[in-house]
Structure formats: structure tokens, C-alpha cells
Image (cartoon, rainbow, N blue to C red):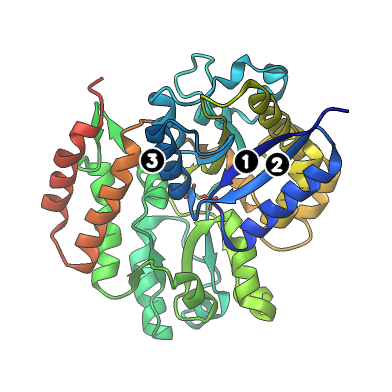
Amino acid sequence: QSKPVEITLMYGLGGRLGEIIRATIDRYNKSQTEVVVRGEFADSYEGVLQKALAGIAAGQPAADLLQLEVALWPRLAAAGQLTDLATLPGFKAMYDGFWPVFRRQTDPDGDGKVYAVPWNNSNPVTYYNPQLLKKAGFEAPPKRWTEYREFARKVKEATGVPALAIPSFPWVLEGAVFSNDGEMVRGGRLALNEPAALEVINTWTQMIRDGSAVVENANTTQDFVAGKVAITFQSVASRPGIKALAGDKFKSNVRVANLPYFKKPVVPVGGATLAIPKGIPQDHVLAAWKFIQWLNTPEQQLAWIKETNYVPVTRATNDLRAFQSYLLTEQGLGQGMLQLPTARPRPADPGYVQAIQEIRKTLEDIWLNNRPVEPAINDLVNRTQALFKQP
Ligand SMILES: O=P(O)(O)OC[C@H](O)CO
């Protein structure tokens, strides 16, 4: 018997989700004898991208398999640094099984070249504290962003704590802008100075300035479970972390609802894909591909989802009776699936990857340093224009 091929998976999820990745790798290694996978933690999704870029610069791929967030893989694909997975055996059978929105996220121009395949995909939801809302006379958070200002003022007044934490990382922003018929990128530049996006940013800024909302920070999840903020907008896959922190208060103090919207419900796709860098030996490519195929079997997807609450990326997983009965075991477990029909890919422009950091800086400048909205956003659009190719 020949020696197993050893490959490395570089991943970006820490905490409880990182533990689940390591347990998944162990399960795979024990299930067969041809491939041994080693996990390497890169600190965050951004960390995986940075290590991959450093590997390219050094002429030595950082790993055999990369967990790349859904908006990050285009940066490496555009640099010609990822393997076209559509050339690998059994690709079509697997790829056809993914929900259409995840195929659009990983093949945005529909040219049939696919540099990253779905694995752990998500969307953002509203986590709320029903006890705090009740004090202000609300059963649930509003469905629409336009109702939030009044709602937030009342929650703050009745409870003394801010109603919501708003992230500067532009994932929830994408959903709100898309829901207002706006775009994040249009005509080779950020479209955040268009009326649809400005309405979102102004709505959020007003709540932050009147003290009924705060800017999300590293302590937001802690604050939320401690009842110091009533609402946080996070990934469906943040649930295990929130649950662990909330302990026996989870059932009474945490509920899940849809993400709010302006004109129509829209959620951005989130989570990550798996990609194989160029420049690794062919037996490693094939070994990495075997592991990807195993991860996306309905049985392994289900095992993964039960621990993480990511959404099933394939129909076959969704159709498992065991998945359907799992959804009924706790409030809110099915929220990601309920929102899936309204999901839209995150921007796939390679320039967007760097623009994300600039968007964060600008929003924090507006929210924490009181900078006026329109000049700050116009400046953002102008200074990031060079990142985008003209259409
Ligand atoms: O927390 P995840 O894995 O669902 O990912 C969320 C988004 O893609 C933003 O990073």
C-alpha cells in the first residue's frame, strides 16, 4: 500500500467554529487511508488571504487548500493564482448540486471557470433579546430599517441600553443597500454615494448619533448576552458562539429574526469557499479535491451544520429528513434557510477586497469621529476608484 498524500488546509475560523473544523479534519483522516489533512489556523478569513498573498510573493503556496471568504477569492483568482476546479474529475456532478445563489457567488461571470467551491455558507440574521424588547412594548424587532429609528429610541428609553449594534464591516451594509435597490459597486467604482446607499448610511448614522445604536466592536457579542445591547446582526453561524456565551440564558434571552430591509428583503451570502492554489504538486491537487468532495457530501454537510448552523450549500443536504427534523429542535435554527430565497452574492470584484478596509475606516470616521456623511463617502468613492477596473 502506498503512503498517504499529506495536504494542508489553511482556515480562518477560530473559537468554537475552529474546534469544529479540527474535529471534521480528524473525522476525515480516520475515514480513509489515501489522504492525511493537516489544519493550519490563519487567525481570520483576512489572515488566510494575507498568508496566501505572502506565499505567492515568496513563490511558495501557503497551503494545498484555502478557506477563502466568499468576497475574497476573486482577489487570488484575478491574479491567476487558483486552480480551475471545473477541470477536476466529478466537478460537474458536484457543482450542479449547489444552490444557484452559491453557484453565482463562485462563478459570477458564468464562464464555467470555477476557482472556489462553496463549503461553509451563511447569511446574516437579527439576534435579539426578547426581555429587553418587551420592556419597551415590542414582541419582535421591526422588519424594515425605516421603522428602526423610532423603535430604537423607545428601546433605549425603556431599558437604558442601546437598541442595536451596527457593524462597520460592510456585510450587513451590502444587504441593506441591495434591499434598497442600490449597489455596492457600479461602473468601476463604489456606489456608496448613490441615494440608495446614502439613505442606509444616514439612517444608521442618525441612530448612532442619538445614542440609540452603538458601533459594533470586539465586545458586542459579550454585551449582547449580558443584556447591554438589545440587538446584534451577525452570521447564522455565530449562533454556537452566542449560545456558549449565553449559557442557560440562551433560551430566554436570545431569539433570531430576519435581517431588516428597506424596499424588499435581501441578504448577502456569507461564509467561505474552498480553493486550491496554483503551483502545488498534482497529487496534492487531487488529494485536496477528494477532501472537498467528502466535505460536501450530504452526510458530512449535515454533521457540520448541526455543530455550526451554517446553511446547507446543496439541495441534497436540505432534503435530508434528518436535516429537516434538526431544524425543529430549537427556535431560529432554520433562519438561514428561510432567508436563502432572498440571498444575493457579495460583490465579486477583486478591487472590492481592499475597498472593504476603506469602507470600514470611513464608516468608523463618520460614527466615532462625527465626520459628516456625504463628504466622507464622496472621498471614499474617489480614493478607492483606482482599485476597480473601468467597465
Ligand atoms: O461568519 P461567517 O463564516 O458566516 O462569515 C460571515 C461573512 O462572510 C463576513 O465575514
Q: SS of the residue at dot 2?
A: strand
Q: How far apart are marks 3 and 1 (CA)?
A: 37 Å
Residue 5 pos. (x, y %): 73, 32
Judge the density around disc 1: few (<14), some (14-19), many (≥20) Cα neighbours within 10 Å: some
Q: Nearer the viewer, residue 115 or 382?
A: 115
Residue that carries the numbered disc 1 in the rendered image: 8
Q: Does the residue labelled 3 lie within 8 Å of ligand 1?
A: no
Quarter of the image holding residue 192?
top left
Q: Which of marks 3 and 2 is nearer the N terminus?
A: 2
Nearest to viewer (mark 3 / mark 2): 2
| Residue at point 67%, 19% (across, down) | 91
Q: Quadrant of residue 240?
A: bottom right
Q: What residue type is labelled 2?
A: Val
Depicted 50 relative to depicted 114: above or below: below
Q: Which residue lies furthest to the right in this view?
A: 1
Q: Position of residue 171 (x, y in %)?
A: 41, 49
Q: Name the residue under label 3.
A: 178
Of residue 141 and residue 50, the one placed in the foreground of this image is 50
